[in-house]
Image: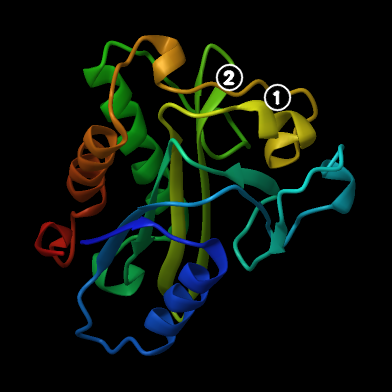
Amino acid sequence: MRHLGRVEYEPTWRAMQAFTAARQADTPDEIWLLEHPPVYTQGQAGKPEHLIASTPIPVVPIDRGGQITYHGPGQVVAYVLVDLRRRGYGIRELVSRMEQAAIDLLAAQGVTAERRSGAPGVYVNGAKIAALGLRVKHGCTYHGLALNVDMDLTPFAAINPCGYPGLAVTDCGRLGAALTLAEAGQALVEALRYRVGQPGADVSAV
């Protein structure tokens, strides 16, 4: 696992691309744990009209699936770089396993979370608390999961989060789950290792 701290979005994205392009059959899978300065990322299916207000926050068009979302301080991001061919399951199952990792983490804090059909991510009482987006290249994934821990949610008001007008957004702090960013990050990595790690190579080693 790589603890990267707070890092700019675009260089981190380019590093994920480079890591994936250079992978060999025996390259260990990795989880990158980090936080980003304020940035909107626009997925491949993204439509400009989902940015509904002008802000000074940069918008970066990227190569994951999905629409527009926001990353910023107080949100823990886990990028999941795995070889699906070696793991023996596909992208849909990986998405489900990653969602379950966030659901597990929240359950341990007394918060009941759920999936929403056709809308990847994790929700609590209809409000989104974790966003998920991936890219698969040559059977290997990058991008990952962003969990709102304790953040300023105001920038979400300038977008239709993940392409859904009026979608409410929340975070752990507002739900009474008093986690620091470091605690949430460690718990998320442990949950991802457990859910993503079988079958195939052991992500607990990264």
Residue 127's tag is 2
Horizontal relation, residue 34 to residue 121: left or right: left
Amino acid identity at mark 1: Leu
Which one is nearer the viewer's eye here, 104 or 180?
Answer: 180
Residue 123's tag is none
Against 43, is 105 above or below? above
Amino acid identity at mark 2: Ala
Which one is nearer the viewer's eye here, 28 or 70?
Answer: 70
* Element class at badge 2: strand
- Give the mark nearer the N terminus: 2 vs 1: 2
* Residue under the image location 65 percent in, 66 percent down: 62
Q: Which quadrant, please, contains the C terminus? A: bottom left
Against 17, is 110 above or below? above
* Extreme residue toward the front, this view: 56
State the residue position of label 1: 167
The location of residue 196, given as percent across then percent down, is: 26, 51
Horizontal relation, residue 196 to residue 118: left or right: left
Q: Which quadrant, please, contains the N terminus? A: bottom left
Horizontal relation, residue 100 to residue 168: left or right: left
